[in-house]
Amino acid sequence: MSEAAPVLTMRHIRKSFPGLVALDDVDFDLRKGEVHVLLGENGAGKSTLVKILGGAYQKDSGQITLDDRKIDIKNPRHAQQTGIACIHQEFNLIPHLSVGENILLGREPMRLGAVIDQTAIFREAEKALRDLGVEIDVRKPVHELNVAQQQIVEVAKALSMEARILIMDEPTSALTEHEIQSLFATIWKLKKKAVAIIYISHRLDELFEIGDRVTVLRDGKYVGTRDVSSISKQELITMMVDRPVGDRFPKQGADRGEEILRVEGVSIKGALKDISFSLYRGEVLGIAGLMGSGRTTLARTIFGLDKPDSGKIYVKGRLSEIRSPRAAIASGIGFLTEDRKTQGLVLGLSVMANMCLPSIEEISKLGIVSHAAEERLSGKFVRDLHIKTPALSQKVVYLSGGNQQKVVLSKWLCRQADIFIFDEPTRGIDVGAKEEIYHLMNQLTANGVAIVMISSEMPEVLGMSDRILVMHQGKISAEFYARVATQEQILRSALGE
């Protein structure tokens, strides 16, 4: 790519939070019509840097130049007015407004200068979605959409602003392969229009598919900037983690023990159809399938969040009436949800409080929680899982996405669950943190714990599972032993072939 003059430069940027320096003397620049990938482990400072650019945070010091003009971005609206649009990792949608109203929020077309033109809103929203190559009912409330559809609405909302600079923070984390390719096609169109794109992703393969340059951050510091065409994946990983990283999927086989969970004929009208399978101690049972295939509904049903119309669930050989999460937890089941922000954490509480929530009864006496027991229990897992937090009392909202995910995982480790349901356990997690979670899965199964792992990343399903169930339209369409299965076989089964 030609070395055009930067449209944006950020120099010596510093930002700190209570007890934590998130950015320390960081440099970054962006050229017209390029995709500049921002890379680093969770907690490296990527999201903080782009939130400063998007007006969500104010820098402590440093300089931002836009079109050779110094600028201090005061707030998100100011950023939009200067031509900067952000798609954050955390959704910024209003659940009870329609898809169309969310896409045009704050920029609603008016009739006679005083009345919002709903017809025009829906027409413009449909065009924005069409440009992405997807069809979503623009009149439907956002809270009725799944995670992937909400992500698409975020993308459409940003693109509809016709921004000169577009920030994409993990935009493909909840998208199917077809939706990802549609997004990439849109990115190529934007590049031809000289739109500059800052792209954050933990999926390194995406970087080589669409990136022009890459800047790596580590522990809040600038490491370096390289042309994508001149660097290898292994070199990037070394820049990110500054330590050797083992095999991508360090699966260790464990001896399969007794049956610990059996699902027989479970059905939910319009969602699940006659689901039956067994899970054994020491096993990782992967569940693959396309979005909407019923994977998450199955997980929610086992955990007591959704009630089956028919069927039975046996835990440790006994018929279990799991009608609520409380009953599932009492049965030794832990659930790592795909949406940690709204379903896995209480963002306003501390790291320690979040970890100990499912174990409150065990660390209480006469209704009073033992603070010493809380500290002892949570401190162990902060150390064991290498959670980056300045203190156990730190509010979990201030942690990076990867460290938040580890806190969710710690909840069930504290509770000593022996059946884990992992729904997208490494979504939005950097390569180093992924390796740590994979090794933890190995430790759990070696100790006789059983894991159900739902993942949209087919290499992950193949690399970390012992057996794989494939779902299609609410049914189990195939079962494979992971050691002999292929991606093609799984995909064909996921498509119902």
Image (cartoon, helix red, strand yellow):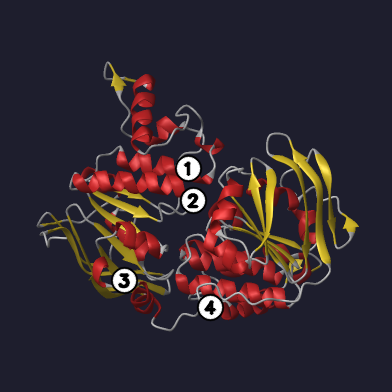
Q: Quadrant of the N terminus?
A: bottom left
Nearer the observer: mark 1 or 2; the answer is 2
Q: Would you call the spot at circle 4 few (<14 residues within 10 Å), some (14-19), or many (20 or more)?
A: few
**Which tag, 1 or 4, sits closer to the chain's start?**
1
**Which tag, 1 or 3, sits closer to the chain's start?**
1
Label 1 sits on residue: 150
**Residue at image point 81% right, 67% down:** 366
User: Label 1, label 3: how many angstroms apart (C-alpha)?
Assistant: 28 Å
- The disc label shown at residue 216, or none: 3
Task: Give the x, y percent position of residue 57.
Answer: 33, 58
Label 4 sits on residue: 386
Task: Give the x, y percent position of residue 148.
Answer: 49, 45
Q: Give yes or no for contact between labels 2 and 3 (Cβ–Cβ under 8 Å).
A: no
Amino acid at pointer 2: Ala
Q: In this view, does 190 lie to the left or right of 445?
A: left
Nearer the observer: mark 3 or 4; the answer is 3
Q: Would you call the spot at circle 3 few (<14 residues within 10 Å), some (14-19), or many (20 or more)?
A: many
**Which tag, 2 or 4, sits closer to the chain's start?**
2
**Residue at image point 37% right, 76% down:** 234
- The disc label shown at residue 416, or none: none
- The disc label shown at residue 174, or none: 2
Q: Which of 482 and 305 is in front in this view?
A: 482
